[in-house]
Image: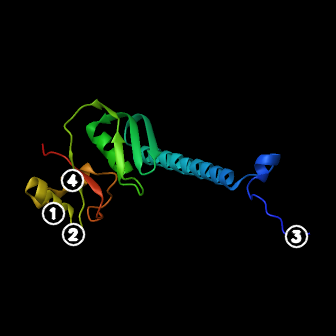
């Protein structure tokens, strides 16, 4: 007897049993993709539940997550509600972009968005947009119920800045 050499991955092809390394890798990749899709679907359902728990009026809300992007559909009661839904989704960990495909039942002017920088306060932001730091409650109210305290904002958070009446 002696040492015999074989083609390592030919067995599965010749006898129809087992799997080649390439087949196992493809199957593992397919399983990983399926697991990722389930996580994304769970995250999307979680965001839909969050929007519902915040009592934001949106009919037929549907959120779809693909990697770090979210797409939102449905009909918001008004522009403010639509913008709040966008902020709930966009300010969630792991979401980099939001594709807004919602419609609005009661059309009103769009608000501006502001990304909080280190050192920002609602007063400082109000001073920048309205020329008066004491207008910070307008920004606070415009971002309820996502904000529960005017002192609890963080860098990277995006806020609604509505026009003054």
Q: Name the quadrant containing residue 63.
A: top left
Earlier residue among tags 4 and 3: 3
**Horizontal side of residue 87 vs 136, given as left or right:** right
**Horizontal side of residue 29 vs 71, given as left or right:** right
Mark 4 crowd level (few <14, some 14–19, many ≥20, 10 Å Cα): many
Residue at (34, 51) in percent of width and height: 145
Q: CA distance from mark 2 to mark 3?
A: 75 Å
Foreground disc of the pair 4, 3:
3
Mark 1 crowd level (few <14, some 14–19, many ≥20, 10 Å Cα): some
The answer to whether the residue labelled 2 contacts the one labelled 4, judged by CB atoms less than 8 Å apart, is no
Above or below — where is 30 with respect to 124? above
Q: Nearer the viewer, residue 3 or 14?
A: 3
Q: Nearer the viewer, residue 145 or 75?
A: 75
Residue at (75, 52) in percent of width and height: 10
Decide if residue 116 is in sight here: yes
Which residue is the site of mark 2?
A: 119
Quarter of the image that includes the C terminus: top left
Which residue is the site of mark 1?
A: 124
Q: CA distance from mark 1 to mark 4?
A: 11 Å
Which residue is the site of mark 3?
A: 2
Q: Name the quadrant containing residue 2.
A: bottom right
Above or below — where is 20 with respect to 57? below
Foreground disc of the pair 1, 3:
3
Which residue is the site of mark 4?
A: 139
The answer to whether the residue labelled 1 contacts the one labelled 2, judged by CB atoms less than 8 Å apart, is yes
Q: CA distance from mark 4 to mark 3?
A: 82 Å
* Percent coordinates x, y for residue 72 in the rendering: 39, 40
Mark 3 crowd level (few <14, some 14–19, many ≥20, 10 Å Cα): few
């Amino acid at each position: 007897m002696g040492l015999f050499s074989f083609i390592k991955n030919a067995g599965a092809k010749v006898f129809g049993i087992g799997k080649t390394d390439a087949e196992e890798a493809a199957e593992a990749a397919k399983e990983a993709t399926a697991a990722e899709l389930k996580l994304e679907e769970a995250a999307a359902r979680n965001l839909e539940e969050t929007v519902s728990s915040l009592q934001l009026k949106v009919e037929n809300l549907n959120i779809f997550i693909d990697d770090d992007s979210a797409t939102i559909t449905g009909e918001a009661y008004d522009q403010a509600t639509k913008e709040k839904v966008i902020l709930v989704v966009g300010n969630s960990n792991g979401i980099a972009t939001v594709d807004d495909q919602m419609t609005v039942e009661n059309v009103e002017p769009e608000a501006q968005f502001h990304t909080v920088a280190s050192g920002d306060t609602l007063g400082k932001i109000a001073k920048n947009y309205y020329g008066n730091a004491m207008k910070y409650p307008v920004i606070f109210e415009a971002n309820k119920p996502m904000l529960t305290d005017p002192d609890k904002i963080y860098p990277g958070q995006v806020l609604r800045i509505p026009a003054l009446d």
